[in-house]
Image: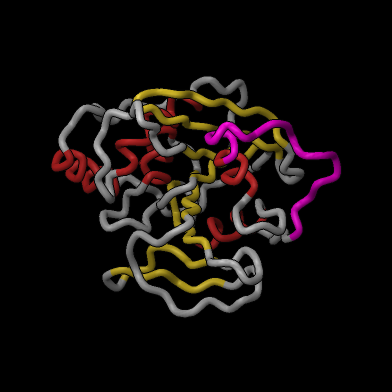
């Protein structure tokens, strides 16, 4: 899965913020997801004391959500840690892992923000534009915005707003767990992003693609799931 070259990766934080502002206008917030047979998840580990991190991509079939393939790349992180600019730090490694895939996923779930970002251009949006593919941001924490309390039942959600704009949703995926922060990455609308996230959960807090990607990035993904594993919550798209 090749990424387009939209900009150089060597730049200052000030230049990176300008790139985000310019590219955010190119993000599609329309529902453009077609027939999904393969769904991918991506994640990256924290750098070690040498400055190296592991980026992982997993591909699952849909709707069975069984592991098809996964790839892991270990490289040095070159961009500094700057809140709001993590996509410039993490994207090169994730792209390198995805270039090793044999399959072509139809949808990518990203452990990070989409447009739920101060400049509406988080990691999921950045990757979606680079690949020109539908992406969904499935973040474990909130970067910006406010929301009302979310009902405890799985599937409940509350709009996440920032400066008067709806930028995502706080989504309860499991009873008695903190919500996920779901947002448009690229080529999806918010309702579809919520639905796809729920459809990729297996009764756990994290959707299966990003959960497995997290395990792979940590070197803890050992084998595919057993036969017969199915999602506990499926919604109509």
User: Residue 33: x, y in percent?
Assistant: 56, 46
**Position of residue 75 in the picture relative to residue 194 (left or right):** left
Lateral position of residue 16 relative to residue 159, left or right = left
Residue at point 43%, 63% (across, down): 168
Residue 103 point in image, percent of width and height: 62, 25
Residue 1 seen anywhere in this rendered image of the structure: no
Dominant SS type (magenta):
loop
Quadrant into which the C terminus falls: bottom right
Nearer to me, 216 or 166: 216
Q: Which residue is drawn at 36% across and 31% down?
A: 49
* Residue drawn at (71%, 54%) of the image: 202
**How many numbered marks are there?**
0
Q: Where is residue 100 in the image (x, y as percent from the top left)?
A: 53, 20
Nearest the eye: 106 or 227: 227
Instruction: Inspect this view and state whether residue 112 appears.
Output: yes
Part of the protein shown in magenta: 215-232
Q: Is residue 218 magenta?
A: yes
The answer to which quarter of the image holds residue 18 is: top left
Q: Is residue 41 within the magenta segment? A: no
């Amino acid at each position: 899965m090749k990424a387009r070259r939209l900009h150089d990766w060597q730049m200052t934080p000030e230049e990176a913020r300008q790139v985000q502002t310019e590219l955010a206008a190119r993000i599609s917030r329309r529902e453009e997801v077609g027939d999904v047979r393969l769904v991918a998840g991506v994640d990256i580990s924290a750098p070690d004391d040498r400055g190296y991190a592991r980026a992982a991509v997993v591909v699952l079939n849909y709707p069975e959500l069984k592991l098809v393939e996964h790839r892991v790349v270990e490289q040095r992180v070159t961009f500094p840690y700057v809140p709001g600019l993590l996509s410039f730090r993490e994207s090169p490694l994730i792209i390198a892992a995805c270039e090793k895939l044999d399959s072509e996923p139809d949808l990518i779930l990203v452990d990070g923000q989409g447009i739920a970002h101060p400049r509406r251009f988080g990691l999921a949006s950045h990757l979606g534009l680079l690949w020109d593919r539908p992406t969904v941001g499935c973040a474990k924490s909130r970067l910006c915005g406010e929301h009302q309390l979310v009902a405890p039942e799985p599937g409940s959600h509350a709009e996440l707003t920032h400066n008067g704009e709806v930028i995502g949703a706080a989504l309860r995926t499991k009873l008695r767990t903190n919500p996920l922060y779901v947002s448009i990455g690229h080529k999806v609308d918010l309702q579809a992003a919520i639905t796809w996230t729920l459809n990729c959960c297996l009764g756990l807090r994290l959707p299966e693609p990003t959960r497995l990607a997290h395990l792979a990035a940590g070197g803890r993904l050992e084998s595919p799931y057993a036969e017969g594993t199915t999602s506990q919550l499926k919604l109509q798209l």
